[in-house]
Amino acid sequence: MDAIVAKAVQQATEDTANLFTKKLLALEEKYKQKIQDLEAQVRTAERHGNQLEQHRCRSHLRIWGLELAPGQNCKTAVASLVRQLKGPNGSPIQCRESDIDATRLLPTKTRVKHPSSNSTPSPSAPCIIVRFLVACV
């Protein structure tokens, strides 16, 4: 009797394991294609995001050599510089700080002293990256 029960338990265990294996394989097949499709969508979205970032960065204006007074706001300095420029018709360009979305002062590096030069190294010209909200006209 014990042998019959043991054999029945073993058979039931094998049947259950086979059933779960079949179900898992079916689920794997079902979701394998979905996962591949989603991975392809993620790669496409990443490429589009990179292209948008590159396009957005192309519209940034880089200004080299604009000296900032200690504690001076970059937006204030850039707006002041833009107001000194002339538009295509010769009139001054109107630009307020509120026309500027963001400015970022990039860190400067010290220029390396040329071996044949007696002068001391000087800081390189500062660079400010500017993104405008609207055209300053």
Image (cartoon, helix red, strand yellow):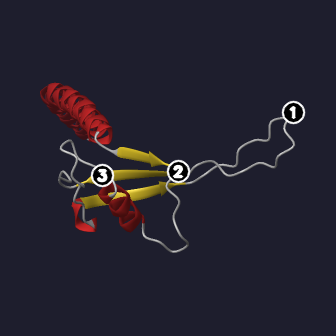
Instruction: Report x, y in % for residue 135.
Output: 18, 51
Q: In which quarter of the image is residue 36?
A: top left
| Amino acid type, label 2 | Gly
Q: Residues within 10 Å of mark 1 (few under 14, many from 20)?
A: few
Q: Which residue is drawn at 80% across and 36% down?
A: 114
Which quarter of the figure is the N terminus placed in? Answer: top left
For the residues labelled 3 and 2, the Cα–Cα distance comes to 17 Å
Residue at numbered disc 1: 116
Residue at numbered disc 3: 131
Badge 3 element: strand
Task: Tell us which disc is closer to us: 1 or 3.
Answer: 1
Q: In which quarter of the image is residue 7?
A: top left
**Earlier along the polypeptide chain: callout 3 or callout 2?**
2
Q: Nearer the viewer, residue 68 or 129?
A: 68
Badge 2 element: loop
Q: How crowded is mark 3: few (under 14 residues within 10 Å), some or many (20 or more)?
A: some
| Amino acid type, label 1 | Ser
On screen, residue 8 above or below 37: below
Residue at numbered disc 2: 65
Instruction: Report x, y in % for residue 62.
Output: 41, 45
- Side (left or right) of 127 relative to 17: right
